[in-house]
Image (tube, helix red, strand yellow):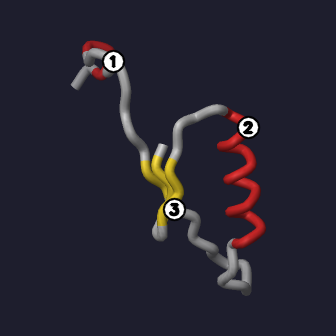
Amino acid sequence: MDYSLLSTPPSCCADFALVPIGTGNPSITAELAEVQRYLKSSGLKHTMHSTGTML
C-alpha cells in the first residue's frame, strides 16, 4: 500500500496511556503531572480520563 496516496483528514483523535515498566514503583503521579502541564501549555485540545488521555 502506498501511504502517500492517502488523503489527510481534517482532524483525528489519539488516545494514550502511561504504563510504568521497570520502575519498581506503580505510581505515575509525577509523570502524569508533567504530561498535564505540557498539554495545557501546548494548546492542544485534550481530555484526561480514568484510563488515559485523548487528544
Q: Which residue is drawn at 73% across and 37% down?
A: 41
Say the numbered circle drawn on residue 8: 1
**Label 1 Cα neighbours within 10 Å, binned few <14 / some 14-19 / many ≥20:** few
Gap in angstroms between the C-alphas marked 2 and 3: 19 Å
22, above or below 32, in the image: below
Question: Would you name the residue on which mark 2 appears?
Answer: 41
* Residue type, label 1: Thr
Asked if the residues shown at circle 2 and circle 1 are in contact, with their CB atoms under 8 angstroms apart, the answer is no
* Residue type, label 2: Ser
Q: Where is residue 43 in the image (x, y as percent from the top left)?
A: 64, 32
Asked if the residues shown at circle 2 and circle 3 are in contact, with their CB atoms under 8 angstroms apart, the answer is no
> Which quarter shows the N terminus?
top left
* Residue type, label 3: Ala
Residue 1 or residue 10, whichever sits in front? 10
**Label 3 Cα neighbours within 10 Å, binned few <14 / some 14-19 / many ≥20:** few
Gap in angstroms between the C-alphas marked 3 and 1: 25 Å
Q: Position of residue 20 (x, y in %)?
A: 63, 74
The kind of secondary structure element at disc 3 is: loop
N-terminal of the pair, mark 3 or mark 1, is 1
Q: Residue at x 53, y 57 (%)?
A: 48
- In the image, taking residue 2 as reference, residue 54 lies left or right, namely right
Say which of marks 2 and 1 sits in front.
2
Question: Would you name the residue on which mark 3 appears?
Answer: 17
